Amino acid sequence: MLVPSRRRLRIEVWIVLGLSLGQSAVYSVVQLLDKMTRAPLAQGTSTLNRSQSTREYFDLTYQLLDITFALVPVLLVIYFLTDQRQTKVGMGQVGGSAFQKLGFNFARPGNDLLQGLGLAALVGIPSLGLYAAGRAMGITTAIIPSALDAYWWTVPVLILSALRHAIVEEVIVVGYLMDRFGKFGWSVPVSILASSMLRGSYHLYQGFGPFIGNAIMGVLFAWIYTRTRRVMPLVIAHALLDIVAFVGFSLFGKSIGLG
């Protein structure tokens, strides 16, 4: 089996990030600067799920397309992480499942669910406190988890949006990057730091409070991954946090801090 060089892996990582969360981080920095040069951050708002059309079924179509295409970089990562061994006739044969390598499967549904619930509780309550503190200090914008109009499909789409964010972030920022950073020869602490800083950076459009909170969450999640080598509990925890925020705001209209 041919082993990719570090240079090739670095190029691969830049491509993946340029198509996904690295791109989001760049936009997030620009959006933060835009907000800061308009007014104090405390007067700004950050809307996470926006309506994209005043026509109900076009809005639904746009929402579903956004969710679907956002998952394409995850498929790319799965492809890159799947071992390809060459047979004697030169045909590609799958040598190792990326789903198994990442722990992104249903091999331990009970344990993964319990760990996910525990992580969601551990992260969720402090996130609300950090959001309140950030608002009081003027370093966090008002976060609006959902601005979708009320249709029959609003809650299901918000749940799908939460799942999308959870899968994209945990598979790429934790599972994929921790694997590649290790192949670069980076130590575990440096890899965790890089992963957590990226997580914080693409939340900067919400202000400095969410940057700090998400960076701390990134340290915790990446550290847990190094111990368990399973990304599924992280996906479950992240999805639960976002479902509560997105759907809770949609139903009850309260600003909820996000992890």
Image (tube, rainbow, N blue to C red):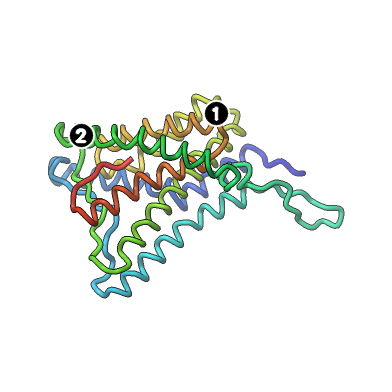
Residue pushed farthest right? 88
Residue pushed farthest front? 110
- Alpha carbon separation for disc pair 2 and 1: 31 Å
Q: Amino acid at mark 2?
A: Gly
Percent x, y of residue 115: 47, 36
Quadrant in the picture for residue 57: bottom left
Q: Is residue 212 above or below residue 18?
A: above
SS for dot 1:
helix
Q: Tell me which residue sits at (23%, 33%) in the image.
A: 129
User: Does 250 sit left or right of 259 as displayed?
Assistant: left
Between disc 2 and disc 1, whose residue precedes? 2
Q: Tell me which residue sits at (26%, 43%) in the image.
A: 206
Q: Nearer the viewer, residue 32 or 56?
A: 56
User: Does 129 sit left or right of 100 as displayed?
Assistant: left
Q: Tell me which residue sits at (45%, 34%) in the image.
A: 221
User: Does 136 sit left or right of 52 as displayed?
Assistant: left
Q: Which mark's residue is nearer the viewer, 2 or 1?
A: 1
Residue hosting label 2 = 134
- Few, some or many residues within 10 Å of mark 1 (<14, 14–19, 20+): few
Q: Amino acid at mark 1?
A: Arg
Percent x, y of residue 40: 13, 40
Q: Nearer the viewer, residue 13 or 85?
A: 85
Q: Are marks 2 and 1 in contact (CB under 8 Å)?
A: no
Check residue 155 in the rendering and tell me which mark sits there, or answer none.
none
Percent x, y of residue 137: 15, 31
SS for dot 2:
helix
Residue hosting label 1 = 227
Percent x, y of residue 135: 17, 37
**In which quadrant will I find the C terminus?**
top left
